[in-house]
Image (spheres, rainbow, N blue to C red):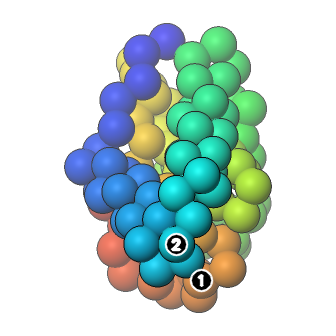
Amino acid sequence: MEIRYHEEAVKDLDQIEQYICGTLLNPVAARRVVQNILRDVMRLADMPYLGVAFSQKTGYMIDARVLVSGRYWIVYTVSQEIVILKIWDSRMELKNLLLNFPMN
């Protein structure tokens, strides 16, 4: 199945990498974290329902799924293609994710 990244997810990956590399001054860890997230996203091509329903993870009725990758949640939808909507640091408050949630 084809995978497409919403612009919000691309921004999220950029911010994750910039934070770890720039703020934490650890470019090796930044590269590793982003590579792990991208690897986990690629697993969805063969197993699109690998993650759990967003509502099961959060209690909020949003038509999306969540795949956990380390400390990050890969939030995505499945239809004719897989759309990666957000990549969210699970240590942050859930309301931050919901405030910036893209609707395809």
Compared to residue 99, the image places residue 40 above or below, namely: above
Do residues under tags 1 and 2 come within 8 Å of each other at their CB atoms? Answer: no
Dot 2: what SS? loop
Report whether residue 44 is seen: no
Taking the image as shown, residue 29 lies to the left or right of residue 71, namely: left
Measuring from the top left, give residue 74's x and y in whole percent: 57, 50
Disc 1 to disc 2, C-alpha distance:
20 Å
Kindly identify which residue carries mark 1. 92
Type of the residue with mark 2:
Leu
Compared to residue 61, the image places residue 43 above or below, namely: above
Measuring from the top left, give residue 24's x and y in whole percent: 55, 77
Type of the residue with mark 1:
Met
Residue 49 found in image quarter: top right
Q: Which mark is residue 2?
A: none
Q: Which mark is residue 25?
A: 2
Compared to residue 85, the image places residue 15 above or below, namely: below
Report whether residue 4 is seen: yes
Mark closest to the chain's N terminus, 1 or 2: 2
Measuring from the top left, give residue 57's x and y in whole percent: 73, 63
Give the mark toward the camera: 1 or 2. Answer: 2
At 65% from the left and 40% from the top, the residue drawn is 36
